[in-house]
Amino acid sequence: MIEFDNVTKRYGGTTAIDRISLSIPDSGIYCLLGRNGAGKTTFMKLLAGHIAATDGVITVDGKSVSPSRMPEHVGYIESGATQFNMKVSELIDAAAELQDEFDRDFALEMAARFELDSRKRYKQLSFGMKTMLTTIITLANNTRVILLDEPTLGFDAIMRSQFNALLLESHSAHPRVIIVSTHLIDEIAKAAERLIIINNGRILLEAGIDEVDEKAYTLSGPAKAVLPLLAGLNCIGKTTAGSVMAAHIYGDRITPPEGVALDRLGLQDFFINIVGGKGNE
């Protein structure tokens, strides 16, 4: 469905995307993770055809993507995107008029669930509600690929939980590729099926959430007992406090000896270590 073939994007002397090759063959909810400046927004803009790659080829359903060939079936919402200052109900009606496959019933149901006042104009909504309305309209347009760039900015904890439910319901009703860029790692894991981690413009990892949950773990205990265990293991970071060491591993689990504990490594801690773990040594 989606292919990045050795794609690079440079802005002058800065390389934002560096020789990325990635295949997304199946529908699903993907979480795009990366530090600020890692290349997440550039990745999305390239896929949406908003900007051109410097080198390499991007295809969606076998058709190359570029600003002169913007893909019909990719919906992209950038963080902070705005709408015309119309009433909520009018914006939904306008979207239904413009988009043949727009699911108006879904949009109205979600707007009611999130308590969006249909009589209010767009500028009268809070920042979080503006973002939610834009997300609902985007998801109701049943394109094959949906790209959401930091969609939960301005959401409180309840709205973030509702947003995850919205993603799951939307994907259940209309299976497709939904890629969500976010910093709220542990929360999006409740909805996402796969992770794409990008760092310094390169893909570090593309894997299933369940796979990461199984393979990411910590060995902790006396340093003299932990260090010998690391030979042959993929240690992504370690911390020491006096004579005690915690080593963070991504790979097959081992059976540690007595005195060394094995614990699950949470998704956020996994991300921190795989992106910058060497600095923890």
Image: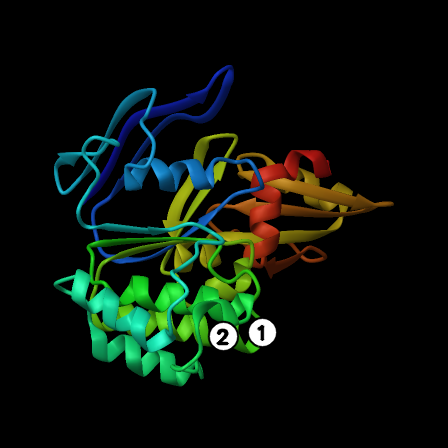
**Picture coordinates of residue 245, whole percent (x, y):** 75, 46
The structure residue drawn at horizontal position 36% and vertical position 60%, both measured from the top left corner, is: 193
The structure residue drawn at horizontal position 61% and vertical position 44%, both measured from the top left corner, is: 273
Is there a contact, CB below 8 Å, between mark 1 and mark 2?
Answer: yes
**SS at mark 2?**
helix
Q: Amino acid at mark 1?
A: Ala
- Tell which of 181 and 19 is nearer to you: 181
Q: Residues within 10 Å of mark 1 (few under 14, many from 20)?
A: few
**SS at mark 1?**
helix
The structure residue drawn at horizontal position 76% and vertical position 41%, both measured from the top left corner, is: 224
Q: On the image, numbered disc 2 is attached to which residue? A: 161
Name the quarter where the N terminus is drawn. Answer: top left
In the image, is 275 to the left or to the right of 114?
A: right
Name the quarter where the C terminus is drawn. Answer: top right
The structure residue drawn at horizontal position 37% and vertical position 84%, both measured from the top left corner, is: 112
**Picture coordinates of residue 9, whole percent (x, y):** 39, 24
- Residue 190 seen anywhere in this rendered image of the structure: no
**Picture coordinates of residue 108, whole percent (x, y):** 29, 80
Numbered tag placed on residue 72 in the rendering: none
**Picture coordinates of residue 127, whole percent (x, y):** 54, 65
- Tell which of 259 and 230 is nearer to you: 230
In the image, is 1 to the left or to the right of 226?
A: left
In the image, is 228 to the left or to the right of 214?
A: right
Using the numbered discs, state the Cα–Cα distance from disc 1 to disc 2 in whole angstroms: 6 Å
Compared to residue 30, the image places residue 68 above or below, namely above
Numbered tag placed on residue 157 in the rendering: 1
Where residue 164 sits, quadrant-wise, is: bottom left
Q: Amino acid at mark 2?
A: Ser
